[in-house]
């Protein structure tokens, strides 16, 4: 994901444009991008919560670390608190689906979820075979969904199942692919009569 910090997706600019007060990073790896994000506090104040298998050294005071598995730790977050969540964890359909569903009540309206490897693992699927923090690895659950594809198709299926709640706002195929979805809850659907003088009817409450 670090390749997308200044290039391609340009995560830095995405953060500066939206200024989320709470950023959650799932899967820190070596911590290179974690440090880049954390030191953006010189631009505006925010909290960075990192969920990963091992802590990252040399971070400023705006960072808190949770040792654990993303989809098991996400439920402990406060509802409607997350302005941005960055996901770069186990690269398979099942894991991403668990993470996205766990995030639904945690994301603020307008909040962004950023995912990596959605092109590299679009049809194919990956699995780490173990968690580095010794928590049980759901190998059978992951294998049971390999027929559905990888992270790319998991994202597409999630958007389909939760249409009216999340919208795909950006997709970048470069550097293994990155995608951004935004929580945009539909309150009603306008009826549009197209033509040279289009007509816009009142939104229909409860229709999405």
Image: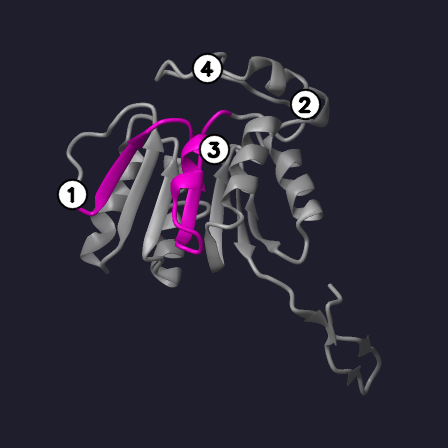
Q: Give the range drawn in magenta.
A: 61-90
Observer-side mark, 1 or 2, equals 2
Q: How far is mark 4 from mark 3, CA to CA? A: 13 Å
* 124 lies above or below 41: above
Q: How far is mark 2 from mark 3, CA to CA? A: 17 Å
- Magenta stretch: includes residue 104: no
Label whose residue precedes the other's in the sequence (2 or 4):
4
Q: Is residue 115 left or right of residue 63?
A: right
Q: How far is mark 1 from mark 2, CA to CA? A: 39 Å
Q: How far is mark 2 from mark 4, CA to CA? A: 18 Å
* 157 lies above or below 107: above
Secondary structure under the numbered disc 4 in the rendered image: loop
**10 Å crowding of disc 1: few (<14), some (14-19), many (20+):** few
Which dot marks residue 136?
Answer: 4
The residue at which mark 1 appears reads as 60
Label whose residue precedes the other's in the sequence (1 or 2):
1
Q: Are marks 1 and 2 in contact (CB under 8 Å)?
A: no
The residue at which mark 2 appears reads as 145
Secondary structure under the numbered disc 1 in the rendered image: loop
Which quadrant of the figure contains the C terminus?
bottom right
Q: Are marks 2 and 3 in contact (CB under 8 Å)?
A: no
Q: How far is mark 1 from mark 4, CA to CA? A: 31 Å
Observer-side mark, 3 or 1, equals 3
Which dot marks residue 160?
Answer: none
Which dot marks residue 71?
Answer: 3
The residue shown at (64%, 35%) is: 154
The residue shown at (53%, 55%) is: 182
């Amino acid at each position: 994901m670090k390749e997308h910090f200044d290039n391609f997706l340009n995560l830095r600019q995405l953060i500066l444009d939206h200024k989320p007060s709470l950023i959650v990073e799932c899967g820190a790896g070596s911590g290179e991008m974690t440090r880049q994000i954390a030191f953006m506090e010189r631009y505006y104040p925010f909290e960075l919560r990192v969920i990963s298998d091992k802590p990252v050294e040399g971070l400023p005071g705006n960072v808190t670390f949770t040792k654990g598995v993303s989809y098991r730790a996400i439920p402990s977050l406060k509802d409607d608190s997350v302005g941005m969540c960055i996901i770069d964890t186990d690269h398979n359909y099942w894991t991403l689906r668990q993470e996205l569903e766990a995030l639904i009540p945690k994301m603020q309206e307008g909040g962004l979820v950023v995912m990596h490897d959605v092109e590299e693992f679009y049809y194919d699927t990956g699995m780490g075979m173990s968690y580095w923090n010794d928590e049980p690895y759901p190998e059978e659950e992951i294998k049971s969904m390999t027929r559905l594809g990888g992270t790319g198709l998991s994202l597409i299926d999630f958007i389909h199942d939760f249409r009216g709640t999340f919208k795909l706002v950006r997709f970048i195929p470069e550097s293994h692919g990155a995608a951004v979805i935004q929580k945009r809850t539909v309150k009603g659907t306008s009826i549009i009569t197209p033509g040279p003088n289009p007509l816009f009817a009142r939104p229909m409450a409860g229709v999405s």
